[in-house]
Every structure is written in C-alpha cells, then in structure tokens.
Amino acid sequence: MSRHITVRIERCVGCHTCELACAIAHSQSQDIEAMILQRENPGYRIHVETYGPRSIPISCQHCEEAACALACPTGAVKRNAPGKPVLVEEERCIGCSMCIQACPFGVIALRPDGKIAFKCDLCISRLAQGLEPACVSSCPTRALLLQDDELANKDKRKAAVQKLAEAQAAGEEEVEALSG
C-alpha cells in the first residue's frame, strides 16, 4: 500500500521545524551541532511556503506517474516497486536537472556542488527502523502525518460527510425558523 505525507494546513504554524529535522536526518553526522561545526549543508527536502496568512509544508508527492522519473535520461529517478517512494539513485544521476524542470511541485534540487539531484525519500532509512519521517516526527502541531493513501481518503470522506450533514442540519433549522 502506498503512503504519503499528508498536510493538515490548518495546523501548520510556519515554525520550519520540519525543514530543520529533514536537514539533520539527511546530514552525514545526523547531529545539529556537528552539522553546523562542519558547515554541512544537506539541503531541505521539505519546504514551508507561505500563501497569504497560511504556512504550507510541501515535499515530493511521490506521484504515481512521476514526471521527474519520466524526464530522467539515465533512469536515476525511479520507483523501485509499486507503492514505494520515488527515489534518486545517486550513482546514476548526472546532474542534468531534467527532473527539476519536470517536477510540477518544485521540490527537487541539485546539491550545492551541482552534481546530483536530491528530493524527499520519505526517510526510507527511518521507515526501515519503524520510525516516521523526520519532518513528521518533529512537527510540534502534528500538521504532518504519514498515512496510507486509503486511510487518508477515508478520513477525507468522513470529514466531507460531516460537513454536508452539518450544512443540511443548519439549512433545516433555517427553514423551520422562517416557517415558524
């Protein structure tokens, strides 16, 4: 079953903790002090953007028909199996940036040396240890969740049904008030 990071926009306070946790998790030392002392810049794989009054975290959506993978001339950007994340195989990447140009979300970048593309990998090493991705586990407001697609869809359906029922109930109360 495919899993994605789900964003609950109404909970995000724009603290950028997810970005920092991501950078630390993808650093050589995996320690913030060592990362700073060694001037290591692993880059963010999640980005908190603002739109009006809202802060919205965005990362790779691991698309089923991934434009980045289709655009990669060497096959370095690929999904190893159905339902698994889209990954960059560093040994095959030539840094051509075709994946960056193809990504509709703008969440792929080149490393500072400009030789290899990088993007969210859902923290596969953490997942293998039974842990959540660093961005998800660090979010103080639980705005980020790692969810199975079907569970996420079920939650959306429940929320939609609740809103419809509340709207209908409010409409019925309004009709009763007008007729009474």
Image (cartoon, rainbow, N blue to C red):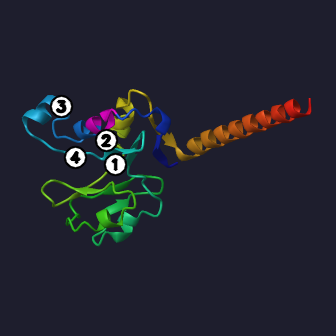
Label 3 with label 1: CB-CB less than 8 Å? no
Residue, disc 4: 43
Question: Which comes sooner in the sequence, label 2 or label 3?
Answer: 3
Q: Residue furthest left?
A: 38
Q: Secondary structure at mark 2?
A: helix
Label 2 with label 1: CB-CB less than 8 Å? no
Q: Which of the 4 image quarters holds residue 115?
A: bottom left
Q: Secondary structure at mark 4?
A: loop
Crowd around label 4: few <14 · some 14–19 · many ≥20 (10 Å): some
Residue, disc 1: 121
Measure the C-alpha gap from mark 3 to mark 1: 20 Å
Crowd around label 1: few <14 · some 14–19 · many ≥20 (10 Å): some
Question: Which comes sooner in the sequence, label 4 or label 3?
Answer: 3
- Up the image or down, 25 lies above or below 105; here it is above
Q: Which residues are magenta?
A: 15-21
Locate residue 9, reporting x and y percent.
47, 39
